[in-house]
Amino acid sequence: MAGSDGATLDGISLVRDAFARTVRLVASARLREAVLAPLADNDDELALLAEIEGATSARLNAEARGRSGLAAAELVHGVPHARFINASFAYAKPRQPMRFSSAERGAWYAALAVETCLAEVGHHLTRALADAGDFNAVVDYGEMLASIAGLFADLRAAPAHPSLDPYPAIGYPAGNAVAAAAIAGGHVGIIYPSARHPGGTCIAALWPNAVQSVVQGAMYRLIWAGSPVWRVEGV
């Protein structure tokens, strides 16, 4: 049950809410075993190879030492799928910030319905294929289901807010400013209407420990066959 006491964050309503089931899509390659595992003949060799692989892993480096904008103490340990949670915050994109995550700190992006996730992922992959000049691709994604609760900045009643602009050059800098203010205030995350799926609701969790009770769900295959129009199949 959502609740609000009239508080705001730079004019954005703050609401206390609990979402028992949110959906995030993760590329199937990240659901597989460690890349170097087939090279190991025993557990000792696997441990050594994992150490080598970890030397170039942003997630493992962040868990050990933190990184600019993300302290190691913020990351989670000993909970189901901790590596997926931590990776979403550690693998920030220095040259490509996202709507509510900066070059130094990622976020856990999710939605209330898988259809919204598919629309968001499909949009961004279509843009990537357009940049590559080839609309032929098959990509598998798996659901990561989680509960998220706490005090959120709520943009659902502010569809004209600059952070929701569909053009990244406009929406992303404004969104990063909202996220920075929410993090400074200790707020759990941001609730916002999807820019790619009319009627869909998205959530950006801004703290690793806000992502609770993660379990893996269904698998989906996104297919492009020579055009920007893509289709989805169950796997």
Image (cartoon, grey):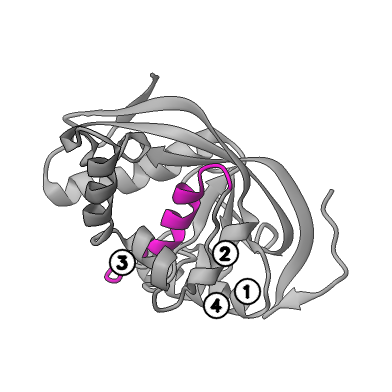
Label 4 CA crowd tier, 10 Å (few <14, some 14–19, many 20+): some
**Horizontal side, residue 1 vs residue 28: left or right:** right
Q: Nearer the viewer, mark 4 or mark 2?
A: 2
Of 76 and 139, nearer the camera is: 76
Q: Are marks 4 and 1 in contact (CB under 8 Å)?
A: yes
The answer to whether one can see residue 91 in this image is no
Residue wearing tag 3: 96
Q: Which residues are magenta?
A: 79-96
**Horizontal side, residue 136 vs residue 195: left or right:** left
Residue 150 picture quarter: bottom right
User: Which numbered tag is attached to residue 206?
Assistant: 2
Residue wearing tag 1: 182
Residue wearing tag 4: 180
Label 2 CA crowd tier, 10 Å (few <14, some 14–19, many 20+): many
Q: Are marks 3 and 4 in contact (CB under 8 Å)?
A: no
Label 1 CA crowd tier, 10 Å (few <14, some 14–19, many 20+): many
